[in-house]
Amino acid sequence: MSDLIKAFRESLETLDRVSAEALFQQALAAQTPIAAIESLVVPALEQMGQAWQEGSVALSQVYMSGRFCEELVERVLPPSDPDRKHQPRSAIVLLNDYHALGKRIVYSVMRASGFELFDYGRMDVEQLVERAIADRIRVLMISVLMLPSALRVSEVCARLKSRDSGIRVLVGGAPFLFDEQLWREVGADAMGHSASEAVTIVERWMGDMA
Ligand code: B12
């Protein structure tokens, strides 16, 4: 798989869409769409982010790769599962950030696993708290990729608690991957490393929320 990731990353860096598409198809032939995304697309983009930090790739390359991967992912993720689950009432949001890909993947994986959930798109703290309470949400999933956005999750949690909402908050995204204690510090109820972990955690919560 590491050879495939390397080749995929090279085709993204050189904006060779044909080759990137072919390599993605190769990964899809061997595994489910979700597994292909998490084992090929996610690590390739992470490596490019690292390379950008070290100065060996340009932000434009990272941006074009992100956009192209979004298209690839959009095409293969199933929109829904016929055996849809209805509990608990859930929503997913991108807080303040513009890094939409992680949220998009988590949303699709949740739906593909049978969950119905609101997609709030991108919101700020105030909008999010009001909307979640108005919608009587039980599980709120927050995706962020920037540290300042992650720190604002603490405002969301504090406001939800002060309104006695009983909403459980599940967070994910790069800052929580970099610092394993951050989710506790911002007052979230859990953190997921991947889209598939989101499903496992919500399923676990379903037992005690029924
Ligand atoms: C691609 C990318 C971009 C693209 C975004 C394209 C898009 N449409 O999303 C572009 C080029 C636009 C971009 C812009 C910027 N970026 Co950027 N970007 C990245 C990069 C390389 C990859 C992100 C990505 O899409 N990964 C693939 C997705 C699928 O992975 P993911 O989001 O982590 O999601 C997975 C898990 O985290 C989890 N997950 C995600 N959300 C949730 C939610 C829940 C509830 C759960 C359970 C799980 C979960 O499941 C997902 C699937 O497995 C990261 C590097 C990195 N290490 O993450 C930097 C990174 C996030 N960017 C960074 C920065 C600084 C920026 C800019 C400020 C750069 C600039 N100077 O302009 C801007 C800011 C944009 C903004 N205001 O939001 C920094 C943030 C650093 C920090 N500490 O805050 C990073 C970490 C790079 C770095 N190492 O410095 N970026």
Image (cartoon, grey):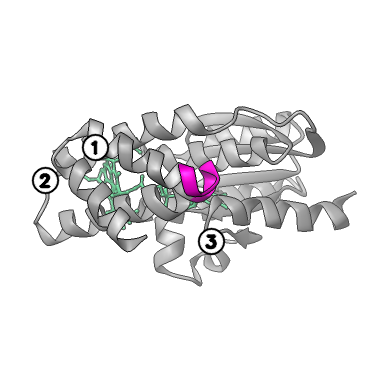
Q: Secondary structure at mark 1?
A: helix
Determine the residue positioned at 63% across, 32% down: 130
Determine the residue positioned at 69% across, 41% down: 113
In this view, the mark in front (2 or 1): 1
**Comes first in the chain, label 1 or label 3:** 1
- Is any part of residue 97 visible from this angle? no
Measuring from the top left, give residue 128's x and y in whole percent.
Answer: 57, 35
What residue occupies the far bottom of the structure in this picture? Answer: 181
Nearest the camera: 31 or 104?
31
Residue where numbered disc 3 is placed: 186
Residue where numbered disc 2 is placed: 58
Q: Secondary structure at mark 2?
A: loop
Quadrant of the snapshot with the N terminus? bottom left
Q: Secondary structure at mark 3?
A: loop
Figure quadrant of residue 96 = top left
Q: What's the distance in space between the residues labelled 2 and 1, CA to CA?
A: 20 Å
Please tell me whether residue 15 belongs to the stretch shown in magenta: no
Question: Are circles 2 and 3 on residues that touch, CB within 8 Å?
Answer: no
Q: Which mark is residue 55?
A: none
**Comes first in the chain, label 2 or label 1:** 1
**Comes first in the chain, label 2 or label 3:** 2
Determine the residue positioned at 62% across, 47% down: 159
In this view, the mark in front (1 or 3): 1
Q: Which residues are magenta?
A: 29-35
Residue where numbered disc 1 is placed: 19
Nearest the camera: 36 or 135?
36
Amino acid type, residue under disc 3 in the picture: Val
